[in-house]
Each structure stands twice: as structure tokens, then as C-alpha cells.
Amino acid sequence: MIIYPAIDLRRGRCVRLQQGAFEAETVFADDPVDAALRWASEGAQWLHVVNLDGAIGAPSSANLAALERIVAAVEIPVQFGGGVRTADDAVNLLARGVSRVIIGSVAVTNPEVVRAAIDACGAEAVAVGIDARDGRVAIHGWAETSTRDAVDLATEMAALGVQRIVHTDVKRDGMLTGANIAACQRMARAAGVGVIASGGVANLDDVRAACAAAAQGVQGLIIGMALYRGAISLTEALRLTQGE
């Protein structure tokens, strides 16, 4: 079980949103590198970095600059998503030092991009982000809920060679109401892929639940608001993943 501290970037700063709403933004660090160094110093094995502006098609040069500084500042791997729309985008992000690229909305609108990215980068370097609202896939920065079933999409992605899905429950994200581990287990079983759970993590019980679901394919847990609000200590969460 890997714990991924989340660093969400908007206009070059580290922020957290509630249910993806930009009007519900809280800034936690003007310089995201400070957050990255904090989580790395506390023992994080990976970082999860998201380009919020890129996810909605807004200019995101400040976020990409912040990403480069994060990658240069820490020695742990970084997975990055938001605004990845072509295989070339994935290749370029790997060249910037990213270890894993997350493809989101384009997996719904143009799934061949996923296949091309895997061909260009390798399956270990590409994940697909499936964000769901009541089991239906949310796209374009969660502004639109499609008719696609999240589990069906995961199964289709597995057929393209995807080995890892990042599943976010949109209605829980940033709300500290508890992670939807059951949905991640269902997705992992149905699609035969590893799933990283995201959205709503509230306390150490969510970490325990994720660890208990590891045998069913839940491979990781992304934690954002709970870390920044102090509801969870990263050190304590990491101890749980190690069976302590």
C-alpha cells in the first residue's frame, strides 16, 4: 500500500478544492515545493501532483514550472495528471522528470491516446484517472458527468494495456467524509487492474480500510485535505501501511 500525499496546483500555488469546485479553494502553500519537501521529509514514497488549470483547459505554465521545481527538489517519484491530452504530452512530462503520467478525460473522449501513450512510454509510466460521480465518469475538470459507467471504462482501459487506475469519488473529494474503498475494490476486481483510491479520506480508519483491501487490488491511497488540515499524520498513516 502506497500513500500518495496530494499537491494540487492552481496558478502555481498548492491548493485544495471541495468536490472540484474552484470557488471552494483553500491555498495551503504559495510555493508548492514547500509542501513537497514536507511530505518527502516525513517519509512519503510518492507524490501525487495535479494540474488543476490544465484539467479545465486553462493556461498552466505556472503549474508546469512548479512541477519542474518539485521534481528537482525531491528524490521520490512523482505521478502527475491534469491536462494530459496526447501521447506527446505524456512523453514530454516524463522528460521533465515525472515518473508516472495520469491520463483523465481523454480516456473517454479519445481512448486511442491511452494506447499510444502506453506504446510510447510503457505501461508502468501511464495510469488512467477515472473520476466518478455516483458511478458515472466525470470529465473536463469534473464540470461534466458523462453517461459512461466508471467500472466499464476501467475494463475497457485494461483491454488497452492499462495496469493502474486512479479512482476518485468526486462527491467525496475534499470533504473529509471517508474514502470510497468499496468502489475501488469493485473496479479492481472487475477490470483486473490495480486501483489507487482518491477522494474523501478523513482519518486513519480510511488508511486501515485501504490496507485491508490491498489483496483485492487497491494498491494506493491519495490523501489531500486530511493531511493539510492535520486530521491525519503522514507518519502515522505510513506506519499503518507497514503493519505497525
Image (spheres, rainbow, N blue to C red):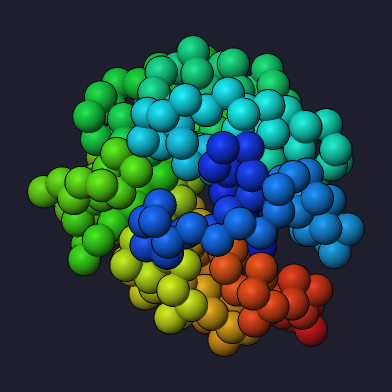
Residue 112, position in %: x, y?
30, 21
Instruction: Answer with left or right where residue 188 lies relative to residue 51.
Output: left
| Camera-nearest residue between 53 and 240 | 53
Instruction: Answer with left or right where residue 207 lies relative to residue 18.
Output: right
Q: How many badges with numbers are in the image?
A: 0
Which quadrant does the N terminus fall into? bottom right
Instruction: Answer with left or right where residue 3 lies relative to residue 202.
Output: right
Instruction: Answer with left or right where residue 25 lies relative to residue 35.
Output: left
Q: In this view, does 68 lie above or below 180?
A: above
Which residue is drawn at the image coordinates 25% and 61% (left, top)?
A: 133
Q: Is residue 226 visible?
A: yes
| Camera-nearest residue between 242 and 106 | 106
Q: In this view, does 65 lie above or below 204?
A: above
| Camera-nearest residue between 163 and 64 | 64
Q: Which residue is most to the left? A: 147
Q: Which residue is most to the right? A: 41
Q: Is residue 119 visible?
A: no
Residue 127, position in %: x, y?
48, 39
Q: Quadrant of residue 226?
A: bottom right
Q: In this view, does 187 lie above or below 102?
A: below
Which residue is drawn at the image coordinates 64% and 74% (left, top)?
A: 229
Which residue is drawn at the image coordinates 49% and 13% (left, top)?
A: 88
| Camera-nearest residue between 187 and 82 | 82
